[in-house]
Structures are given as C-alpha cells and as structure tokens.
Image (spheres, helix red, strand yellow):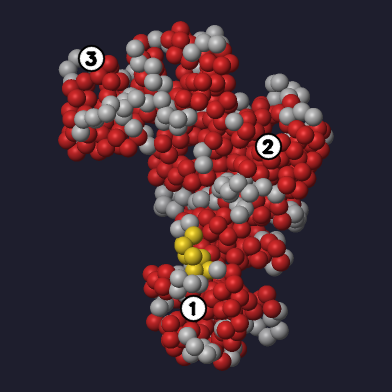
C-alpha cells in the first residue's frame, strides 16, 4: 500500500506549477515548498504538473529541478518526478553504466515488477535510450551474469496462479541437483528461475523445502563473497516476498558506516506508491525501531525531509 | 461472410471473394471476429477462437485446408498457435525463428500475450523447456527480444560486431557457433536496422555474405535471413514449398506464409521471388495448387 498522503482537495496542476515556479525564482530555492507539493501528489498528478509547467513556462520542470537542487535531494526528486516505467528504465541504465557484479538493481526491477510493467519499462527504455534494455544488458555484462540477466530482463512471465505440481517437484529436484554439484550457472537453473511463472516458482521453492528440509537459499550460501550466488538468492527472495527483500535493502543501506543513498532513494521512490506500508511494518518488526527514526538518524536536510514525506512521516 | 457460412455447406466463391476484398483490412476481420460472438471470445486484448469451433470450421472448410480459419484468426493468436504446434509436435524449429524475427517488436509481444492467454504458460518457458538442442539459447533469446525499432545506428559498433561475427565464424566448429555468446548476443538483442548495417560491413570485410558463410548452420542461417530481409527469406520458403516432392511440413508453409504475409509484405515477396527465380509467384501457385484452396491463395496473394 502507498504511504503517500495526498490532500483531499488538490490544487490544479497549473496552480501547483505556479507555486513551484515561485519556489525556483530568485536567489536560493524554497525546498520546503517543493517537498510540500511534489511529495504529496500521485504519479498521475505529477505527470499533469509536468505538462502544465511545460505549457506555462516553456521548460521541462525536470530541467528546473536539476538546476535548483543538489546532490541526493536532487537525485531523489528527479527520480520521483518520472513516470514509473521511465524511472525504472533510468535506474536500469544507471545500474548498467556503473555495472558491478554485486549490483542488484536490475534483478530487483525485473523480478518485482509485473510482466506488463516490465514491458512498459522496456518500451520506456527504447524511447529514452534509443536501444533495447536487453542489448545494453548483454553488452555490459559477461559470462554467467549475462546468461542470467539477459533472459531475466526479457522474460514475460505468465501471471496466472495455475501450478503444475509434478513439474514443481521435478524442477525442485533439478535445482537441488545442480546446486549440489556447485554448478550454479547451469542452464537449467537459469531456465527455471528466468522463465517459470511466479506461482510455479513459489510451488517449486515450497517443494524444495519439503523435500530437502530447508529453504533453497540456504544451499546457495556456500560462498558469502560469491556475487553470482548473491544474485540467485536475490531473485529467489524477490519472488518469495518482495517486501522483505526491500526491507533488507533499506536496512543494509542505513546500517553501515555511512549510508547507501543510491539504494535508499531507489527503494523509497519506487515503492512509496506501491507497498511502502508493508515494508515499514516489516522494518519495525525486525528492527524494533520505526523506519522514520532510522532515516532521521542517517540522513539530513532536504533529502531527509523528502524521504520522510514519501514514507508518510512528515514532521 | 455470414452468407458464406450459414446453412448447408459453404459458399466458397463468396468466401474467396471476401478474402480478396478484405486484404489489407485487418479491422474488417476484427469486426468479423466480433460479430461472430459464438465463435470468438474477447480474451485479454484480442478475440480468440473457441477450440470447438476451430474444429468445426476446419471440417467445414476442409476444402480450403485451414486457410479460412487462419485468415480470420487474430495474427497474435495465429503466431502463438504455430509456435505451440512447433514445440509440441516437433515441427521444424525454423518456424519459431520465422515468427520471432519477421514480426515487428509489438507483433512479437502480441504473440507472447496470446500465448499466455491460450496456453497458460509463457512462450519463452515452453521454448526453453522443449528445445533441448544446442540452439535452445538462441531460440529463447529470439522469442524474448523486444528490439529497438528506431533508425539510430552506431556505425562503429556495427563494424566491430561484423568483425566479432567474422572471427566467431572462422574459428568456431560447426556445431559450436550457435552456442557462441557473442553471436547470440548480437543476433538476439541488436535492432534490425543495426543488424542490416552489420551484415553489410560483414560482406565488405569478408567478401561473402554472412548467410553464405553460415552455410547450413541450424537455425542460424534462417535467423540471419529473416532479420536481414523477410521478403527474400519468404520467397525462398515459397520456392521450397512449391517444388515437386515437398513434404507435408514444407507444403504447410504455403498457407502459413501467404496468410501471415498477405497484409504485410506480399508485394515485396512477389518481387523477390521474381528476381530470384524468374517466375511470377501467382503463376507457380496457380500451377501447383487446386480448387478452392488455390483460389483462396491467389485471392490473398493478389493479382
């Protein structure tokens, strides 16, 4: 569920644009006003503001935001203002440009979006980058990672709930066999994880647990430094429970020395209107501390205020 | 069309003339599907055939072979059913290459949407599961592609990839080429305009077209042909299918190609056929086929 709080009576997009224009004018910027408006509008409303602003002032509001804002706050607001498919396309492209095998933004996006949402991302990628997502993934990755990630971003999983029980059993067995042989990049593992429907995979993972006495991820922990295993585990966790997966990303982003703003911004801007509520609940259960307290401790200034607003915890 | 189907038997002439009149008018056929409420159901974005009615129609239209059924079907459903047939009845896999490579990106997506609706699995999961030969990765990549369709091309990249392909072809063993990661990457992810430029550079660099150098490589030669020029590819298929002694699968290609291309690039296929074989496609079809089936084909091929 969304954590956005949107006022009952929302000003017209033109009024919002006018206010935002005032926030940019003159020396300095009224960040508080920007947050007060943009962090309290839905994706559809933000799109209308973007159109209204362009009509009224002949400029894309994103350009103005880029000029006026800085650093993490700027990054977060820019991402926030994009339509979700375009946002995901931008995040995917960024992940590829600074690709490292420990990066899982691509996995996150490919697995937690629905099949149709993922196709919208691919379409947005065409429009923005004049290439296909899969061609860029293929070029920026190699070896087992390429074999895993290209099918992953290209999949169009069936979204029905039907499960073939005997197939689940046989594929659980197959997974176990290959994992046992430490043949992690094996075609069968990749085939199963990247093409089967989520319902079918859940049944397969359940079968694995029943048959072998422990969850499949336990068997994928042989080497904690192995990024490929990390990638496989992430795929599986995103399928089993995306909210738990996101809670962990946030937890790790703010628990270390320093903060991984890249990950924090990514999760919050992409989940605020989707399932941030559940993520907050899981966070509280797991850490006995409300998420907003952790964010307040670890971030400052406008960036902090913006994130708090998105998770519904404005001061 | 209604008169053609009502009552006893079938008015073949009316149907053949409808085929001709409704070329290049997919919206007319869509209307037809909508008006035959009993035969079609609205299903996730396209009107699909009820399975029982397909069976009934096939019998009714036996003399047309299944051209009427295929012609009335939504293109997405057609492609999904053909792909499914290939995977489950072990028809030749080039049909999968054909569908994946000669349809536009949106049409291929449409086939994948239809596949979900019809078979409750994804196309790529079935391809991955049923194709166990070494070209499985190539086929999965081809059916999963959502190629960029704009004209923007990076010439340097095309040149360098032509070289990559050339090196792979020179050094690979015959069977291994289809497993080569770079070959698969280039052929399954690059845009078609980019690939055509790449193939052009290949010819400049190596003196032969990449098709020639691929020889009889399973699926690879078809892949390149379909990506480079569908009309040329289809005219070759036409030639094969109209030869004496062609087997059933090859003969099925006649219906398949004509029905699926009538609205797309039939004129270019005829031109390519004429250029390659020195004959008019319509004439050869008229010679080699009979009765209502022939009339239906000629109607779709156009005069």
Name the mark on residue B270: 1
Quadrant in the picture for the C terminus of chain B: bottom left
User: Against B46, is A213 above or below?
Assistant: above
Where is residue B67? Give x, y as percent: 55, 79
Write the residue at 76% across / 28% down: A214
Which chain does the numbered disc 2 sit on?
A: A
Q: Which residue is mark 3?
A: A28
Q: Position of residue B227 (x, y in %)?
A: 54, 60
Q: What residue do we see at 51% from left, 24% from top? A: A279
Query: What is the spatial separation of the Cα atoms under label 1 and label 2, in whole angstroms?
Result: 44 Å
Subunit that carries the residue with mark 1: B
Contact (Cβ within 8 Å) of mark 3 with mark 1: no
* A144 to A76, vertically: above or below: below
- Earlier-in-chain disc, 3 versus 2: 3
The chain letter for the residue carrying disc 3 is A
**Residue under disc 3 on the same chain as residue under disc 1:** no
At 54% across and 28% down in the image, what residue appears? Answer: A243
């Amino acid at each position: 569920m969304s954590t956005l709080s949107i006022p009952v009576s929302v000003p017209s997009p033109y009024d919002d644009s006018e206010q935002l224009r005032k926030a940019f004018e003159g020396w300095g910027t009224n960040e508080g006003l920007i947050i007060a408006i943009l962090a309290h509008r839905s994706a559809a409303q933000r799109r209308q503001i973007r159109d209204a602003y362009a009509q009224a002032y002949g400029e894309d509001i994103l350009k103005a935001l880029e000029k006026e804002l800085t650093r993490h706050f700027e990054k977060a607001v820019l991402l926030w203002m994009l339509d979700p498919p375009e946002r995901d396309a931008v995040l995917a492209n960024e992940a590829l440009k600074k690709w490292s095998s420990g990066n899982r933004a691509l996995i996150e996006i490919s697995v937690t979006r629905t099949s149709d949402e993922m196709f919208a991302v691919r379409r947005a990628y065409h429009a923005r980058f004049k290439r296909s997502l899969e061609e860029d993934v293929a070029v920026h990755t190699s070896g087992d990672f390429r074999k895993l990630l290209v099918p992953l971003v290209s999949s169009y999983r069936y979204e029905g709930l039907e499960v073939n029980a005997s197939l689940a059993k046989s594929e659980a067995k197959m997974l176990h066999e290959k994992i046992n042989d430490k043949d992690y990049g094996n075609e069968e593992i990749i085939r199963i994880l990247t093409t089967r429907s989520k319902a079918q995979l859940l049944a397969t993972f359940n079968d694995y647990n029943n048959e072998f006495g422990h969850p499949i991820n336990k068997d994928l922990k042989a080497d904690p430094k192995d990024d490929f295993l990390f990638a496989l585990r992430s795929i599986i966790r995103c399928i089993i429970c995306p909210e738990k997966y996101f809670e962990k990303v946030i937890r790790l982003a703010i628990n270390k020395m320093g903060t991984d703003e890249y990950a924090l911004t990514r999760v919050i801007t992409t989940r605020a209107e989707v399932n941030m509520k559940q993520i907050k609940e899981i966070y509280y259960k797991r850490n006995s501390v409300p998420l907003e307290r952790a964010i307040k401790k670890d971030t400052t200034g406008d960036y902090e205020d913006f994130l708090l607003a998105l998770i519904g915890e404005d001061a | 069309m209604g008169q053609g189907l009502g009552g006893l038997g079938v008015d073949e002439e009316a149907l053949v003339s409808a085929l001709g009149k409704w070329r290049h008018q997919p919206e007319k056929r869509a209307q037809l599907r909508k008006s035959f409420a009993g035969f079609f159901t609205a299903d996730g974005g396209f009107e699909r055939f009820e399975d029982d009615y397909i069976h009934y129609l096939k019998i009714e239209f036996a003399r047309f072979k299944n051209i009427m059924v295929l012609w009335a079907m939504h293109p997405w459903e057609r492609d999904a059913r053909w792909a499914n047939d290939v995977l489950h009845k072990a028809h030749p896999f080039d049909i999968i290459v054909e569908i994946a490579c000669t349809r536009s990106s949106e049409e291929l997506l449409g086939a994948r949407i239809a596949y979900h609706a019809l078979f409750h699995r994804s196309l790529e999961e079935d391809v991955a599961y049923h194709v166990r030969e070494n070209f499985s990765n190539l086929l999965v990549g081809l059916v999963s592609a959502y190629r960029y369709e704009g004209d923007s091309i990076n010439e340097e990249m095309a040149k360098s990839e032509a070289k990559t392909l050339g090196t792979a072809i020179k050094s690979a063993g015959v069977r291994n080429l289809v497993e080569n990661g770079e070959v698969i990457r280039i052929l399954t992810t690059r845009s078609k305009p980019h690939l055509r430029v790449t193939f052009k550079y290949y010819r400049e660099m190596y003196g032969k077209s990449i098709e020639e150098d691929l020889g009889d490589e399973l699926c690879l030669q078809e892949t390149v042909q379909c990506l480079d020029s569908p009309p040329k590819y289809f005219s070759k298929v036409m030639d094969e299918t109209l030869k004496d002694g062609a087997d059933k699968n090859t003969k099925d290609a006649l219906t398949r190609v004509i029905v699926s291309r009538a609205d797309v690039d039939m004129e270019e296929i005829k031109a390519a056929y004429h250029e390659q074989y020195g004959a008019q496609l319509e004439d050869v079809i008229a010679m080699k086929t009979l009765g209502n089936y022939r009339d239906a084909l000629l109607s779709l091929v156009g005069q």
